[in-house]
Each structure stands twice: as structure tokens, then as C-alpha cells.
Image (tube, rainbow, N blue to C red):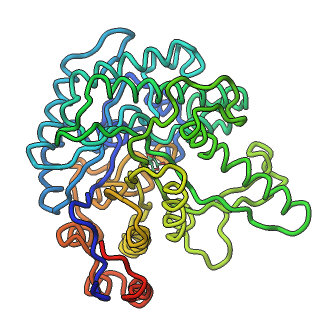
Amino acid sequence: MSTDTLTFPDGFIWGTSTAGHQVEGGNEFSDWWAWEKKGFVDDGTVSGRAMDYWNRHEEDHVLMKTLDYKGFRLGIEWARVEPTKGCFDLKVIAHYRRILQSLRSHGFNICLTLHHWVLPQWVADEGDWLTPGTVDHFLGYAAFVVEELGEFPDFWVTLNEPMVPAIMGNFLSRFPPQRHSIRAYRAVCRSYLRAHAGCYKLIHRLRPSAPDGSRTKVGVAMAYPWIEPWMSRGPAGWYERLAAFVVRRAAFQGWDHSILTGLSHWIHGGPAVEGIKDSYDYCGINYYMRASLKFDRRIRSQYWIDDTKAPPGVEVTQMGWQIFPKGLYCTICEVWKRFRKPILITENGLADDTDSQRPRYIIEHLAQVHRAIREGIPILGYFHWSFLDNFEWRAGFSKRFGLVAVRHDDPELRRVPRPSAHLYSKIARTNSITREMVTTYAPELVESVFAELDERRTICV
Ligand code: BGC
């Protein structure tokens, strides 16, 4: 293997990721839509027409194609498909069909998410995931989508980061429905486990094969932040270690335990969920950052833990998140050891309006993916978050994650690829990271990125 190039396996999927509510626009029958209108978004914006992907999807697909991207992750919005209880909107499903058909005709590998946090308002009104019937309603919606659109996805994501809305919406009160209750958090987690298990089963029943004839691939896009205690001195340090232990379990270890063993985890409580064991065909990893948990007696609402601070000298993104590429490698290794299933990086990226950090971020994180591949871990692809700038939930439009810039207040919503979009394009086209690319886009990394490529340690891929 050349020590000037990181070459990825043949057929590696170079994709980008989005979610319906964040880019489509007009998701008006949803709980987030109503919540945004109440003024809860930090910058005062509402998703509104978002990036109008709903109408401009063809233009976006052509741009992705021009950039040589190979895969696309998108979502279906439950609130659009079933705006009122029991009534499926056939026009909406026909529109999604056109979107997927367009992706297929451009030759993209399709990764389809069935639920990315947003609920129909009628589900929210009935008590969202706390109401026992919600899981059955969700499975009804999922079955309808799988029947109607099941011929398209190469990968299915049943739920996006289920633990994030469980914690943010039920425990920390930062997302709708803004509860502050451990009990609600645990009940919602149990509903998500049931929703995933049911969905896994029904997709396999209705669509046993993927478009290429292989076995259908179903998984979850799981958020795996790298969580560490700050390590203050004295009792504060003990509290931080305890917090890190609990937060890791709440964020992903409890969930992973149930998938692996079929048993319920103490963090969620309740009985074991039928069908949950082994309900992954691949492991979806969403990785962004390291969080260092610091004791702060002033923030009672967050149980005296501040997760927003970075240790001195650590670079942060526009979100204030610590950039920690090695965490991606460590996460891949942990997930691989735990499940022994192929891995798909379903999200990785950063908010960076000026694109001053993104090229470096991409190269450094991909170098960690390559390192894991060299060690023999089967990684199928990488989907960068995000293709376009989009509606960043509570942060509104002020945080820009796109390879392609779009300003929500531009009447034309022009798509302007950032330099990193072109870097990613070169990587996708050549299926590799070359010394020349690193020299052009992130010269300070040249030595470190290729340092480990010595012939004796390298497994050719
Ligand atoms: C979510 C995305 C979000 C991104 C950046 C992920 O946790 O799946 O919807 O935009 O992080 O915050």
C-alpha cells in the first residue's frame, strides 16, 4: 500500500445525510412545527420552508451526482404521511416515491430513515411515546411505508438516535414535549425499543431482500458521543465519574445491551422486549464529538453536570462541541467488539459556517475510519452530515452543517458548495485520501494522517 494514499475498500459508500424535517420544509402537521411556533428555538427561527428539498430534490440530486457522491440518507416524515390519525396521504407517498425514484435513477445508494424525532401532532396530543398505543400506530405507519416504498432502500434506519429525544425531550426538557422526569425517560426508551423491534420484524417480513438481491439491511442510527469525566479534584471528580458512568448507559450502553442480549437494562427498567435481541443487520454510528462532564453546582436543571466545556487547548466547533477524531475510531472498535456486525457511519460532521474547520475535520475523521478498516473491521460506508445546511433543531438555522451552503433567508435558497464539498467529491471519486488532497485542504495534517501507514502494520484493503 502506498504511504501517500489511504485507499478505501471497493464499493465503499461515500454518502451524505439529511432528515426530512430539517430540509424538506412545510412539515406542518408535526409536533416540532407547533413547538417552533411557540418560540422555543434559540435563534427565534422556525423550520418553515427549510431548504425546500421537498420541491428541489431533483436539483439537489443532480448536484450530488455532479459532486460524485454515491449514497444519500434521507427520512420519511410520519406527520406528512399520516397527518390525521388513520388517514394516509396518498399524494405524499407518491411524492416520496418520485424522490426515491430520482435517487435510484441517478444511481445512489439509498439509506432511508423511518423516524427522525418528529411526530405527527395527533400522536403528540395523545401523549406521544408515553401512550401504549403509539408503538402500534408507528408500526402501522411503518408498514404502510414499507409496502409503498420498500423497493428502494439499500439500508433501513428504523429510528434515528432514539436516546437523544428520550433524554432531551423527557429528562432535560430541551426538546418537545419538554418533560423533566426520569420515569417518562424510561417509559419512552421502552417504547422506542418496542418500536424498533417491531419495525425490524415487519421490514424483514414485507421486504426480505434489498434491491441488489441481498438480505434486507435494517438498523438504527445510534448516537455515540465519546463521554468522559472532567476529572476535577475531590468529591466533584467522583461525581463526574459517576455521571459519566450513568450517562454512557443512558445514552447508548443500555440500548446496546438490550439489542445484544434481548434483556431489559436497569436504566430502562420494565420487562424484556420481544424480538429485540439481535435486531441489527448492521450498526449505524452517528459520531460527532467528545463530551467532558464537569461538576457545576449552579446548574441544577442538568443535575449539576455541565457537558458544554472543553478542556484547555481543545478545538471546538460552532456548536461548541469538542473535535475528537480518535473517538470515532474507539467507538467503531467498541461497536464492532460488541455486535460483530458490519458498520455504517450514518452521520459525522460539524457546524462550521466559514468552512475553516470542515476540510480538516473530514480528513481526520476519515483517517480514523481507515485505521479501523486496516485493522479488519468491516465498514460499509460513510455518510457525512450534512449535504445541505439545514434546520438544526433547537439551534434553528444559525448552525450550519452543510457541505453545501444554503441560507434560509435567501429568497432563492441557492445551493453553494463549500470547499469541503469539493474535497469530499475528490475523495468519493478516487475512493481515497491522497497526500495531494491533504496538502491542499489541510496541510498541517500531512505528517499525522500518513504517519501510521508503515508496511509492516498495514492490512491491505
Ligand atoms: C441528528 C441530526 C442533527 C445532528 C447535528 C444528530 O444528532 O441526527 O438531526 O442535525 O446531530 O446536531
Q: Residue furthest left?
A: 105
Which residue is more in the foreground, 427 or 173? 427
Question: Residue 343 location, x and y as percent?
Answer: 40, 54
Q: Nearer the viewer, residue 456 or 40?
A: 456
The quadrant holding residue 430 is: bottom left
Q: Does residue 363 lie above or below 104 as drawn?
A: below
Quarter of the figure with the C terminus:
bottom left
Residue 354: tell me if it is visible.
no
Farthest residue to the top: give it: 86
Q: What residue is drawn where x is 54% and y is 38%?
A: 259
Q: Going 79% across and 58% down the picture, which residue do you hit?
A: 240
Q: Residue at x 28, y 24 (%)?
A: 145
Q: Is residue 29 above or below residue 229?
A: above
Left or right, 180 with reference to 337: right
Instruction: Tell me which residue sits at (18%, 37%) in the image.
Output: 100
Quarter the N terminus occupies? bottom left
Q: Horizontal and vertical percent for residue 189?
A: 60, 31
**Can residue 117 be seen by looking at this rendering?**
yes
Q: Picture coordinates of residue 156 (x, y %)?
A: 33, 38
Q: Please say if 423 is above or below 284.
A: below
Tell me where residue 418 appears, x and y as whole percent.
Answer: 27, 67
